Image: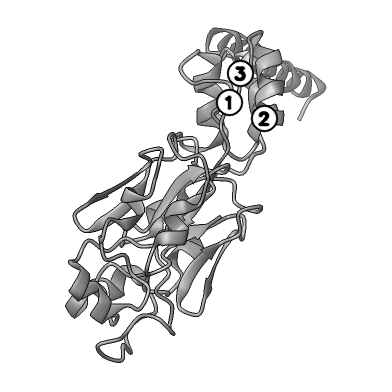
Amino acid sequence: MSVTGILAAAAVVGAVGVFVGLFLGVAGIKFKVQVDEKEEAVLAALPGNNCGGCGYAGCSGLAAAIAKGEAPVGSCPVGGAPVADKIAAIMGVEAGSAERLVAFVACAGDCDKAKQDYEYHGVSDCSKAAFVPGGGPKSCSSGCLGYGNCVKACPFDAIHVVNGVAVVDREACKACGKCVAACPKHLISLIPYKAKYAVACSSKDKGPVTMKACQTGCIGCGICAKNCAEGAVAVADFHAAIDQEKCVGCGACAEKCPKKIIVKL
């Protein structure tokens, strides 16, 4: 190949390179994705657990919502007040005070207190066991099945199965709500961390039925409600419930409960 041919080839390659570079440069400017600096700053302030406890699909979804003003700065249950303060500073607003929540399992029917109708040898999964006759091997169809779907769902190791019943570590719990969604019996709820008492039973069966199934189940007798001076306890469908907004933590309901199913937290 002659020198002229080599130079011509080099010129063509160089021209193509320049053209491609210019094309990519123009395309980069034209199709540039605008980045919201506040959104990026909020995302950096979030803990990055992507637990979904805020109701959004991960931390990036929450960051976008906060940046757009669609979610409060204190929406992250994992980060709590410290993260809310950081995000509030980024957004230029007041953080306010967000009430701390914690998961609570409304069942105390462990292996010693709850009766079983039969031996279950199926898959160790609460969702599967809930579909067998009677809603599981326990006589109480509302009782904790104890196969740990909530344990598997918790990203903070804050819930464990103890003697057949799920138990929450209140200090480790971040109130992300994953255990709530994982329980097929709907026994887990988020309650105020400051709550002093709660009813550890979900059964709505009549008293005699509950007494046959579990030694400690709520029988709906109403003694707790009659002894609550604040009107914070009510019985409906043979089941006692505490209004945490009214409860002052006096403990009268727990003291008078004949089944001792109202527990101190």
Whether pointer 2 and pointer 1 mark residues with C-beta atoms closer than 8 Å, the reply is yes
Left/right of residue 68 with respect to residue 24 in the rendered view: left
First-in-chain label (2 vs 3): 2
Give the position of the C terminus as an image quadrant. Answer: bottom right
Dot 2 crowding, Cα within 10 Å, few <14, some 14–19, many 20+ = many
Classify mark 1: helix, strand or loop. Answer: loop
**Res 74 label:** 1
Q: Hey, what amino acid is under mark 1?
A: Gly
Rendered image quadrant of residue 74: top right
- The local secondary structure at tag 2 comes to helix
Depth order, front residue of 163/259: 259
Tag 3 secondary structure: loop
Which marked residue is nearer to the observer: mark 1 or mark 3? Answer: 3
Residue type for callout 2: Ala
Residue drawn 65% across the image and 36% down it: 79
Q: Which residue is mark 3?
A: 96
Residue 139: tell me if it is visible: no
The spot of residue 94 in percent (x, y) is: 64, 12
Position of 47 relative to 113 (above/below): above
Contact? badges 1 and 3 (CB < 8 Å): yes
Mark with earlier residue (2, 1): 1
The quadrant the N terminus occupies is top right
Q: Decide: few, some or many residues near mark 1? Use Cα within 10 Å; few <14, some 14-19, many ≥20.
A: many
Identify the mark nearer the N-term, 1 or 3.
Answer: 1
Along the viewing direction, whichever of 19 and 262 lies nearer the viewer: 262
Where is residue 75, by image quadrant? Answer: top right
Identity of the residue drawn at 63% across and 18% down = 95
